[in-house]
């Protein structure tokens, strides 16, 4: 836990006087709220087992309810550049309506793309890096092929605007996860893609932190003492839930 001091001061310098500074400091303090790798695996496994039992009609209903909550957010209405994850066909809140509504509203929509990292010698690495690349149109979205997980996926990153290279940045990110709680804690799928992306995205201090919206089904909301955060984990700013709730910091 001693290594927490570095990231704490780095994040403090990064966000300065932004409206998110206090929110960040609340969880960057050293604590004993850590979670073993085995504990995280067990938690993920239990939630995935629960979600796998949900009927398609229930996932559709909850997804539509959560999407309506996003549409009502002032931050969404004002957003010009938004990142939206593309969902698995089962066991996850669906974002199809969000993608279509955002494109129809004239927003620039960015979606996750896993790019292969090159080594210093120019060789391809086995490691992947999540990038946020622009989705050009509804027609392109309709034509996306699904990957092995059943997720609509961009064929390549060539010729696409990368949010990391854009001066405009991102105003909002719709964040997936395995679970969330009322303290805005999140546990992801275990690869750390979103945490690393956000750390890199905000690293030079020139970009405003995007408004982070956790997007989930009702069975993915846990009691606050069940999710243990690490120093590199990012909280979200709000969580919209498929049962019609919108959680903010301190929600029960």
Image (cartoon, rainbow, N blue to C red):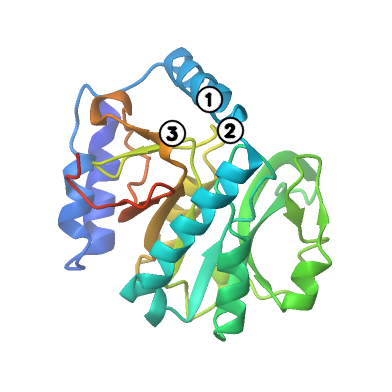
Q: What percent of the width, then of the height, locates residue 177?
A: 48, 41
Q: Position of residue 6 (x, y in %)?
A: 27, 41
- Tell me the residue that label 2 is attached to: 54
Contact (CB < 8 A) between labels 2 and 3? yes
Q: CA distance from mark 2 to mark 1?
A: 7 Å
Apparent side of residue 251 relative to residue 10 in the rendered image (left or right): left
What residue is shown at x 40% (from left), y 16% (from top)? 36
Instruction: Report if the CB atoms under discs 2 and 1 are less than 8 Å apart.
Output: yes
Residue at image mark 1: 50
Residues tagged 3 and 1 counted as in contact (Cβ below 8 A): yes
Is 88 in front, or is 26? 88
Image quarter of residue 49: top right
Residue 206 visible to the viewer: no
Residue neighbourhood size for the residue with mark 1, other residues' Cα within 10 Å, grouped as few (<14), some (14–19), many (≥20): few
Pick whichever, 222 or 132, lies toward us.
Answer: 222
* Mark 2 / mark 3, whichever is N-terminal: 2
Secondary structure under tag 1 reads helix
Q: Nearer the viewer, residue 115 or 75?
A: 75
Residue at 23% across / 41% down in the picture? 28
Residue 66, above or below 38: below
Q: Residue 79 location in percent, x, y?
A: 42, 78
- Real-space Cα separation, disc 2 to disc 3, in angstroms: 10 Å
Circle 3: is it few (<14), some (14-19), or many (20+) Cα within 10 Å?
A: some
Q: How many marks?
A: 3
Which numbered tag is attached to residue 235?
Answer: none
Residue furthest top as drawn: 38
Give the residue drawn at x 30%, y 56%: 237
Question: Residue 191 occupies which quadrant of the picture?
Answer: top right
In terms of sequence position, does the residue under pointer 3 or pointer 1 come before the other? 1
Q: Answer whether residue 34 is visible to the viewer in this image.
A: yes
Instruction: Specify the label residue 219 is tagged with.
Output: 3
């Amino acid at each position: 836990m001693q290594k927490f001091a570095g990231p704490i001061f780095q994040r403090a310098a990064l966000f300065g006087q932004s409206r998110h500074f206090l929110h960040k400091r609340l969880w960057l303090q050293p604590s004993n709220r850590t979670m073993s790798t085995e504990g995280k695996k067990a938690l993920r496994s239990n939630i995935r087992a629960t979600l796998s039992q949900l009927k398609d009609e229930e996932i559709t209903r909850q997804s539509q309810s959560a999407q309506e909550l996003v549409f009502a957010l002032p931050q969404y209405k004002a957003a010009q550049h938004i990142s939206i994850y593309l969902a698995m066909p089962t066991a996850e809140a669906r974002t199809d309506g969000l993608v279509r509504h955002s494109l129809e509203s004239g927003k620039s929509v960015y979606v996750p793309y896993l790019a292969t990292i090159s080594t210093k010698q120019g060789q391809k690495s086995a490691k992947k890096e999540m990038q946020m690349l622009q989705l050009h149109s509804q027609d392109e979205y309709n034509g996306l092929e699904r990957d092995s997980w059943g997720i609509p996926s961009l064929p390549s990153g060539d010729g696409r605007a990368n949010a990391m290279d854009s001066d405009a940045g991102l105003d909002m990110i719709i964040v997936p996860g395995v679970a969330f709680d009322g303290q805005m804690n999140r546990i992801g799928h275990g690869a750390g893609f979103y945490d690393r992306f956000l750390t890199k995205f905000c690293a030079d201090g020139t970009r405003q932190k995007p408004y982070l919206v956790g997007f989930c089904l009702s069975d993915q909301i846990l009691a606050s003492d069940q999710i243990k955060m690490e120093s590199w984990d990012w909280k979200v700013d709000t969580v919209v839930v498929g049962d019609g709730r919108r959680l903010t910091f301190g929600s029960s």
